[in-house]
Amino acid sequence: MHGDRNTGFAIMAVLYAVSGALSAIGAVRPLRADTPVALLAGLAVVGVVGAFLLWAGRHRLSDRTAHAALLVFSALVAVLAWRSVTAVGIVGLGPAMVAMAVWTGHFLPLRTARVHVAVLVVLVTAGAVAAAPGGFANAWVATVVTVCVLAEVQGRTSLKLIRAAATDPLTGVANRRSWEAEASRDLAHAHRSGEPLTVAVLDLDHFKAVNDGEGHVAGDDLLRALAQAWGSELRGADLLGRYGGDEFVLCLPGTDAVSARELLARLRARHDAAWSAGTATARPGDTLRDLLSRADEELYRVKRARTA
């Protein structure tokens, strides 16, 4: 899942609760004599219990739970389609399908969302065909197309928003907020696994002179060129971010102090711009703030030594 997981599970709990409530209403006040009251009552219980469990555990539930909850939801809608006795009853399940499609598009990676929507459509269509009420095909095709289109649009829109929120617009690397979030996760993994992790702070030398002498456009071009040059040398697991102004940060999982210095030497060879760096390797109990503080201290020692 991406985005706010707590919100995602909370919204899913609401979907379960609404579905359970509507099933309960259908069981208490059936519209037809052949309405499957027992089934609706069972679905009402499942919806209410599922909503409670999702809401209560929203702070700690895993991605697997989200996928399982979506599959259960799809199966329940398919059962309702199967036991529907009219075409209107089947097509009336469209809002539930739309709600799930929008949820998957917003909270899941686009490929995963497509898989869940495909499973939903296949299951519910199978249930509708098994019910075999006449005259529902045209309306059902429109419903399926709507569900698929909404999921795709929501997924693409969410992906653009996530990228925009996590990326520095000038250089294309991670912005401060997203870098800190990802680096914190890498640090937590390093503490659990015992693997080394090093953080580096990179600061351009005489960047103000570039802006004052050549203009801010030249300064922006330099920042973009450096980010691109450094990025071509980094591994997939390494995380480069722009911390602000002319300061960049690196999170290097699986990298000790010696390897970090070797990497910085390779980065220097990628571009002739002058810059200084400070590094800090994680110790037991370190927070990301501790690492950045030590790296900053080393950075300014290096700068002071050059001007002394």
Image (cartoon, grey):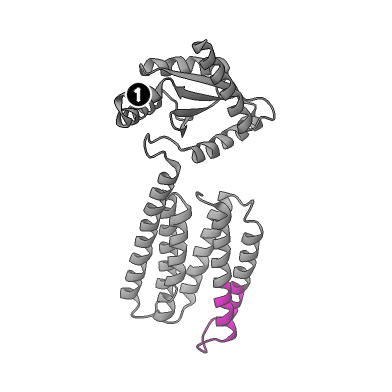
Assign a secondary structure to mark 1. helix
* Residue at 61 percent of width and 30 percent of height: 190
* Residue at 66 percent of width and 25 percent of height: 283
Question: Which of 143/160 is in front?
Answer: 160
* 227 within the magenta span: no
Q: Is residue 228 above or below residue 64?
A: above
Q: Residues within 10 Å of mark 1 (few under 14, many from 20)?
A: some
Q: Is residue 91 above or below residue 148?
A: below
Relative to 192, is 155 on the left or the right?
left
* 30 within the magenta span: yes
Relative to 77, is 298 on the left or the right?
right
Residue at the far right in the pictured view: 285
Q: What span is in magenta?
A: 19-44
State whether the magenta stretch is mostly helix, strand or loop: helix
Q: Position of residue 131 (x, y in %)?
A: 43, 76
For residue 258, what is the image quadrant?
A: top right
Q: Is residue 17 above or below residue 208?
A: below
* Residue at 41 percent of width and 50 percent of height: 161
* Residue at 33 percent of width and 31 percent of height: 216
Identified by mark 1, the residue type is Val
Return the residue at label 1.
210
